[in-house]
Image (tube, coloured by chain):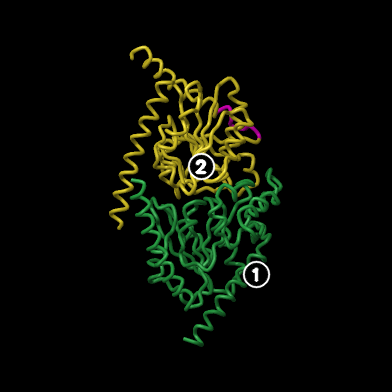
Chain colours: A yellow, B green
Amino acid sequence: MAVRTIEVRERVMARNDELAAGVRERLARAGVPAFNLISSPGAGKTALLEASARLLAGLKLGAISGDLATDNDARRLQRAGIPSRTITTGQACHLDAEMIHHSLHGFPWDGLDVLFIENVGNLVCPAIYDLGQEANVVALSLTEGEDKPLKYPVMFQRADLVLLTKADLLPHLDVEVSRITDSLARVIPDPQVILLSAHTGQGLDRWRVWLEARRASVAAVSHRHASHP
Amino acid sequence: MAVRTIEVRERVMARNDELAAGVRERLARAGVPAFNLISSPGAGKTALLEASARLLAGLKLGAISGDLATDNDARRLQRAGIPSRTITTGQACHLDAEMIHHSLHGFPWDGLDVLFIENVGNLVCPAIYDLGQEANVVALSLTEGEDKPLKYPVMFQRADLVLLTKADLLPHLDVEVSRITDSLARVIPDPQVILLSAHTGQGLDRWRVWLEARRASVAAVSHRHASHP
């Protein structure tokens, strides 16, 4: 029984990695960096993207939002000026590469400067599914406490950037940011961390700089591809 | 491929339900009610149990805490005076009945007045796994926003009680409690809700009353079993 389950899981993962490689290749050729946003439910991914729409007003942004049951996030992003579509996952606890592959059909992603993928709110399952993203951005709300990197290590080990969100609440919490970064340093050697608040704007400049640097490196690779086909 | 995965999942679920029935039977005979606490990461399950230890000082409490990688929660509960053990789930995103079955071995649960099961922090996967509990208690932090019941409907449909935690933060949030209860009422017909704060003590009396009522009904059934074996 257990062996059968593991066999099936390995085949699912191999198929996922194959599809993710295809998605990554297509996005890279078009010079579109995709950022996979992952967090617990309610850590502020959508609020961050709403703020990012204002912050990156000169760029063409797009988003794919995963949700078990609603299209609330995609509708919020549309209202903020980010063309968005929803992937309704039902009981599936994460996005996978096949969902992204299908979602790109008919979505005008190839003219975008940045594609955000807003994963299902879950600090466990999304960690192991490659979606073809340029980078994983994990949002951790300060309200979640200081030890989450130790308790959900796989997720944080796969993070290229950790955003500590809801910084505006810090004065009201029994939490020290240094203890969160200490926890992070115990699971990843050199964590990149930005403390921010979509509410007050704190830290959003650093988020913009990080995004633009990642975008520039993707655009440079895409340009070299185009010059030497 | 998909069919094979579903077949395996159905067999896993059938086996889980069988083991959960066994756990429920053993707990019922001993008159020990088990409460399955479920929430997003960092919604305050452990803080609530720490507060409950003070609140229910006359009762013998015990806890089983699920965690991917640490025993932080069980150690916190031990310090609060609640005998506890950890189930380390590794990459598993939820507890299952087999884990509870094994965890009860060698744990002096049969003298307890209440057994708390603190699930892995996850609003998706734990929803469908019966653990042999008397009731599911879902903790939703006010910091997570107003639409979570709509976005994670399966979890809230299985909730016997919803605790709205971190009530002390309400003045600092752009959140209305009535909007959360409206969302809840759209997924369950008659939601039982308690607004509370482990920090200030708000609402803890109602939580105690609810627990004692559920405990009394289990004890009554257990007593009838004992009288008419």
According to the picture, the residue beneath numbered tag 1 turns out to be: B209
In the picture provided, is A179 more to the left or to the right than A15?
Answer: right
Q: Quadrant of residue B156?
A: bottom right
The quadrant in which the N terminus of chain A is found is: bottom left
Secondary structure category for the residue under label 1: helix
Q: Which three-letter amino acid code belongs to the residue tagged 2?
A: Thr
Q: Is residue B159 above or below residue B210?
A: above
Q: Is residue A66 above or below residue B82?
A: above
Q: Quadrant of residue B194?
A: bottom right
Query: What segment is highlighted magenta in the picture?
Result: A200-206
The residue mark sitting in front, 2 or 1, is: 2
In the picture provided, is B179 more to the left or to the right than A61?
Answer: right
Q: Chain of mark 1?
A: B
Secondary structure category for the residue under label 2: strand
Gap between marks 2 and 1 measured at Cα: 39 Å
Q: Which three-letter amino acid code belongs to the residue tagged 1?
A: Val
According to the picture, the residue beneath numbered tag 2 turns out to be: A88
Give yes or no for residue A203 being in the magenta stretch: yes
Front one among B92 and B201:
B92
